[in-house]
Amino acid sequence: MLMAGSAAIGITTHLRGGHAIDARLEQYEHCERMRVASHSGDYILAELALSAADQERGLRDRDALAADGGMVFIFPEPVLPDFWMNGVAFPLDLIFVAPGGAVLEVHRSARPGSVDLITPSGPIIAAVETAPGRFADLSPGTQLGFDCAEGERSPT
């Protein structure tokens, strides 16, 4: 769940399983969900948090997260937001995406219910919350692919 923030730039690099994130929010407003894919082809089908209200709510007050589920926070310009786990009942990996679309860093297994702030080490244009270990192969510099996923079924 996002504590504070806003971020993004336009990127058009084609990646396996999608395109690099593009922070022009209007292009995602019609998406039901977003498919987020790693370079290995593994992916999740994530909800989008585009508005400040959706970003503040995040995955709070839910009982569980599907193994292939998650949430994508897209910011209209690069920001340095704070996240926390207050009200979240399950652990999460937080993937911070730098301007340019590469992974800046991954915060692994954030503790459920924690009020400790989780802040990326630099400005980001997007963040992805997912089940711990879902993208175990990610490291700084890795590119993720992002596409709208209307009607797509889970890979598992």
Image (spheres, rainbow, N blue to C red):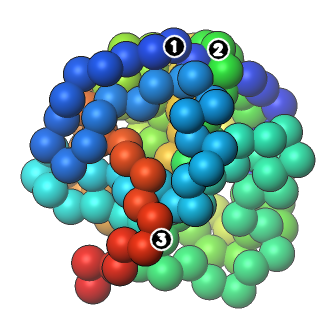
User: Quick one: SS at disc 3?
Assistant: loop
Q: Residue at x 42, y 30 (%)?
A: 21
Quarter of the view holding residue 61: bottom right
The answer to whether the residue labelled 2 contacts the one labelled 1, judged by CB atoms less than 8 Å apart, is yes
How busy is the neighbourhood of tag 1: few (under 14 within 10 Å), some, or many (20 plus)? some
The CA span between labels 3 and 1 is 25 Å
Residue under numbered circle 3: 69
Q: Residue at x 37, y 47 (%)?
A: 147
Mark 3 or mark 1: which is in front?
Answer: 1
In the drawing, what numbered circle is on residue 77?
A: 2
* Amino acid at circle 1: Ile
Q: Nearer the viewer, residue 79 or 121?
A: 79
Give whichever of discs 3 and 2 has the lower sequence position.
3
Give left or right: position of 102 versus 132: left
Answer yes or no: is residue 14 visible: yes
* Amino acid at circle 3: Gly
Residue under numbered circle 1: 9
Q: Residue at x 61, y 50 (%)?
A: 30
Which quarter of the figure is the C terminus placed in?
Answer: bottom left
Q: Is residue 86 above or below residue 102?
A: below
How busy is the neighbourhood of tag 3: few (under 14 within 10 Å), some, or many (20 plus)? many
Give left or right: position of 63 versus 61: left
* Amino acid at circle 2: Glu
Quarter of the view holding residue 129: bottom right
The CA span between labels 2 and 1 is 6 Å
How busy is the neighbourhood of tag 2: few (under 14 within 10 Å), some, or many (20 plus)? some
Give whichever of discs 3 and 1 has the lower sequence position.
1
Give left or right: position of 59 versus 68: right
Give whichever of discs 2 and 1 has the lower sequence position.
1
Answer yes or no: is residue 119 visible: no
Please state the horizontal and vertical placement of residue 106, each as a whole percent of the image: 41, 40
Please state the horizontal and vertical placement of residue 83, each as a whole percent of the image: 72, 41
